[in-house]
Image: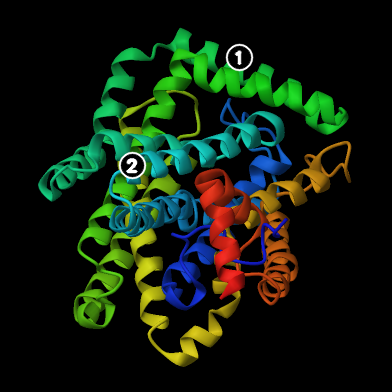
Amino acid sequence: MPSLTSRPANPTSLPVTERLPVLDILRGFALMGILIMNMPGFSASFFVEADGSHLWKDPIDQLAEQAREALFSGKFNSMFSLLFGIGFTIQFARMQARDPASATSLYLRRLVALLFFGVVHACIFWPGDVLHTYALLGIVLVLGLRRASDRTLVGLIVAALLYPAVNGLVRLAVFTKELTAERVRIAQAFEASNNTAFGGGSFVDMVRENLRIMAHFYTDAINLWGNLGWYVMLGMTMLIGVLAGRRRWVQRIPELLPQIRRLTWWALGIGLVCGVAFTVIFELNREPGPSPIKVLGSVCYSLSRLALMIFYVLVIVRLSQSAAGRRWMAPWEAAGRLPLTNYLMQTAICLVLFQHWGFGWWLQVGPALGLVLSLVIFFAIQVPWSLWWLKRHERGPMEALWARLTYGGAGRGGVKQARAA
């Protein structure tokens, strides 16, 4: 029986020599940022501060929280969805070139496998999972938008940019004081049950509570409305990635460097201005419920999310063009070659640290220490592990399993052929 991880697991997997290193670097950078942003959800309830209070009173924690929101919030899951869109165009084109008749069904099988990972991750281990979101958006992309024109995609992107303003105005019309108070009571009840299950319960208690949270996320009407905004924002950057893939922007980086330099500074300026604006707006208006100023804050958040994500991407693209830059970014490149494995590893590590059945650090790590802990986990555990693994294998264990679930017997044949060669 061939090993799942020793060789490429399918005939359409990308050999190491054909990979685009800048995409791996971006994936690694996104993994680091996602861990930073997920740390509060690992160490405390998703439902904290529903009444507008501060969970963490220390000034350094509040400063770290505000910096995290302004510089990191939403930027890195958006970066992953951008990379998902780029990867879709590359992978699907290769599948069509090799087997046009089965390319669509094969890619859908890949997405269903990802959806399986995401649902298991969300329901059993951690409800903050994003994999199922990417998978569902990918299915819409394959079945509904694969043949859409660039003009249609641009129109959808513009509509997604307008969504926060329209959504905010609708919320102003719909939300009453009574409804707002009821939502606060629901959130506080979930916070209490989270603290009991995660801060004092067993592994089984954790799973039960995760299932309750996921049911609430996807059956409660108000939460479904909120989820729509989440899907719209990630869908927008996924479509930008599809455009980037169609126009081969990644392969044309040297040619596009003059435009990249100009766009970098525009993205930084817009991102910082909007980031400071939404951080100040939401800090000064912490009372529950919508308001006109919060609508402006939501628009600023959406613009900052997109602009700073683009800034980070363009800076990494520029640095990756030199040998010195590539050497400096080698840690991110190594982590980015094992994105699924490292993403799930972050959950495993943090559950052991924070759940009662592990080290029991629930509600003991504030934003400042959480930022430090995120960087320690990434650079002291995940990067060295990735470098060690890649010296022995060409793909991560979860990436290999994903390929096996996607390509089945063809994957095993590809392994045997590679070994014979």
Looking at the picture, tell me which residue is in the foreground, 149 or 3: 3
Q: Which mark is residue 104?
A: 2
Left or right: residue 153 compared with residue 381 = left
Q: Along the horizontal axis of the image, is 124 left or right of 20?
A: right
Name the one closer to the observer, 146 or 317: 146
Quadrant hosting residue 361? top right
Q: CA distance from mark 2 to mark 1?
A: 46 Å
**Residue tagged by mark 1?**
185
Does 193 appear above or below 415? above
Q: Residue at x 40, y 52 (%)?
A: 84
**Crowdedness near tag 1: few (<14), some (14–19) or many (≥20) residues, C-alpha within 10 Å:** some
> Viewed as shown, does residue 68 lie left or right of 137?
right
The type of residue carrying mark 2 is Thr
Q: Nearer the viewer, mark 2 or mark 1?
A: 2
User: From this viewpoint, is residue 274 visible?
Assistant: no
Residue placed at 47% from the left, 50% from the top?
Answer: 77
Q: 196 or 6: which is nearer to us?
A: 6
